[in-house]
Image (tube, grey):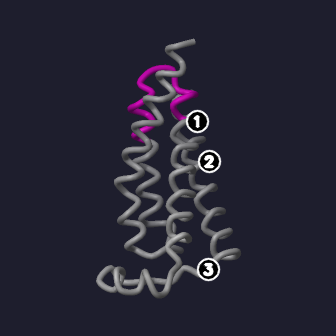
Amino acid sequence: MYRNIFAVLLGILFSTVGLVFSIKWLKKCCVEIKQIHLIMYIQQLCFYYKFDIILLLILLYTLNIILGCSITAYMVLNAKTAYSILTGSIIIIIHLFLLCTVSYWLKIMIIPIIFQLSYFSGEFIKFLQKTN
């Protein structure tokens, strides 16, 4: 039981730290991310942001989610997919309410990606451990 709790906390820690550092790195190196309302998103995306920066931010988010959920699924003994989805759900709550450095449309856009990646990372680790 303690191993499962430790695995979930470790996955959340890795993912959250990776998210914070990737946002800080992107703000420092590439562009300052400002608040854009969802209505003005389509109009201002082409003129204000470079589309590559948004794709890079989404890529960094997905890599951190895969890392955190894979660590959780690797350390848990049973129900690897369920624990990785639990980790993804907790990361969504942390992402929505505690990380206030990115705009709201990006937070809303990332939610389906987090759910799918947490499920697939659990299934992938389960497949890798079954073959060995």
| Image position of 13 (left or right of 51) | right
- Disc 3 crowd rating (10 Å Cα; few below 14, some 14-19, many 20+) is few
The answer for how far apart the CA atoms under marks 2 and 1 are is 8 Å
Q: Which residues are magenta?
A: 71-86
Name the residue beneath numbered marker 3: 31
Q: Amino acid at mark 3?
A: Val
Q: Under tag 2, what secondary structure?
A: helix
* Above or below: residue 87 compared with residue 39: above
Residue 122 versus residue 87 in the image, above or below:
above
Residue 30 image offset from top left, x and y in percent: 65, 76
Tell me, for residue 71, which label it has, or none: 1
Neighbour tally class for label 1: few under 14, some 14-19, many 20 plus, Cα within 10 Å: many
- Crowding at dot 2, Cα within 10 Å, few <14 / some 14-19 / many 20+, comes out as some
Foreground pick, 68 / 50: 50
Q: Secondary structure at mark 1?
A: helix
- Residue receiving disc 2: 14
Contact between labelled residues 1 and 2, with CB atoms less than 8 Å apart: yes
Q: Where, by quadrant of the figure, is residue 16 drawn?
A: bottom right
The amino acid type found where label 1 is placed reads: Ile
Which residue extends farthest left? 39
Between the C-alphas of marks 1 and 3, the distance is 31 Å
Q: Is residue 83 left or right of residue 42?
A: right
Counting residues from the start of the chain, the first of labels 2 and 1 encountered is 2
Is 116 positioned to the left or the right of 124 in the image?
left
User: How far apart are labels 3 and 2 at the CA level?
Assistant: 24 Å
Which x, y percent locates residue 31?
62, 80
Going from the N terminus, do you reach mark 1 or mark 3 first?
A: 3
